[in-house]
Image (spheres, rainbow, N blue to C red):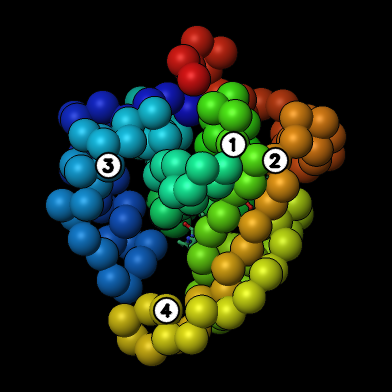
Amino acid sequence: MIMHFAPEDFQEIIEIEKEAFSEHNSLLYMSFYEMARDGFLVAKQDGKIVGYVVGYRSAENEGHIFSVGVKEEYRGRGIGTELIYTICSIFLAKGLKYARLEVRNSNKKAQKLYKSIGFIPCWTEQKYYSDGEDGMVMKMHLHPYRLLISKQKYLKPSFSYKNSLSI
Ligand SMILES: CC(C)(COP(=O)(O)OP(=O)(O)OC[C@H]1O[C@@H](n2cnc3c(N)ncnc32)[C@H](O)[C@@H]1OP(=O)(O)O)[C@@H](O)C(=O)NCCC(=O)NCCS
């Protein structure tokens, strides 16, 4: 089930983020809650937070996916894909035309996932990460039919987001 982040989820999010990324900034997540809470989502299973995504409007027509992470033992079950679909649907509902994200050049697994959803590699940001690694910028044109068709193609129906999620 995908829901909006609540302050009591903070500790679990930070643990997932530490596990998923080599560089992290815990304080950023409370700022996201204060400034962009519509785009701060968590995936819950068995009463636990197992993943999160943070996205916000970064330009007039564009939503930026800042971070997505899934707890290691819950990966490969479609949760990351569902989180990305959900944030893209939220962008679309807000009238945005594009979704954008950056991904490490070495992170082939995440790149494959994004491509399967419809993101296209656009350009490389040299030394985007603090350890000097380049980042690949990927973008997707947001369209309701595209989201619907690729969602039906790739997702198992068992993991769905809460219908009452207000966007
Ligand atoms: C990238 C990340 C968020 C993906 O999350 P995830 O929940 O594992 O993603 P999914 O399960 O939706 O998809 C991953 C793979 O599982 C497969 N999968 C999806 N649903 C599945 C299911 N029900 N059963 C088995 N496999 C499944 C997908 O096809 C995909 O396979 P592939 O790698 O061969 O393409 C996660 O690996 C992660 O947190 N990584 C560390 C942080 C990170 O890299 N974040 C992205 C930074 S840009």
Percent position (x, y) of residue 157?
72, 26
Q: Are marks 1 and 3 in contact (CB under 8 Å)?
A: no
Q: Secondary structure at mark 4?
A: loop
Residue occupied by mark 1? 96
Please tell me how crowded label 1 is: few (under 14), some (14-19), or many (20+) other residues with Cα within 10 Å. many
Farthest residue, direction top: 164
Of the residues under marks 1 and 4, which one precedes in the sequence?
1
* 106 vs 118: above or below: below
Cα distance in 3D space between marks 1 and 4: 25 Å
Q: Residue furthest left?
A: 27
Give the amino acid at mark 2.
Leu
Local secondary structure at mark 2: loop
Residues 44 and 138: in front is 138
Going from N to C along the chain, the mark reached first, 3 or 4, is 3
Query: Is ligand 1 closer than 8 angstroms to the Cβ of mark 4?
Result: no
For residue 18, which quarter of the picture? bottom left
Q: Is residue 60 left or right of residue 117?
A: left
Q: Which residue is mark 4?
A: 128
Residue displayed at 26% across by 64% down:
24
Cα separation, mark 2 vs mark 4, equals 25 Å
Residue 116 horizontal/vertical position (percent):
75, 54
Cα separation between marks 2 and 3: 23 Å
**Which amino acid type is marked by label 4?**
Tyr
| Front position among marks 2 and 3 | 2
Asked whether the beta carbons under mark 1 and mark 4 sit within 8 Å of each other, the answer is no
Q: Residues within 10 Å of mark 3 (few under 14, many from 20)?
A: some
Name the residue carrying label 3: 32
Residue wearing tag 2? 142
Q: What whole-number distance in Å separates the C-alpha atoms at marks 3 and 4?
A: 21 Å
Dot 1 amino acid type: Leu
How far apart marks 2 and 1 lie (CA) works out to: 7 Å
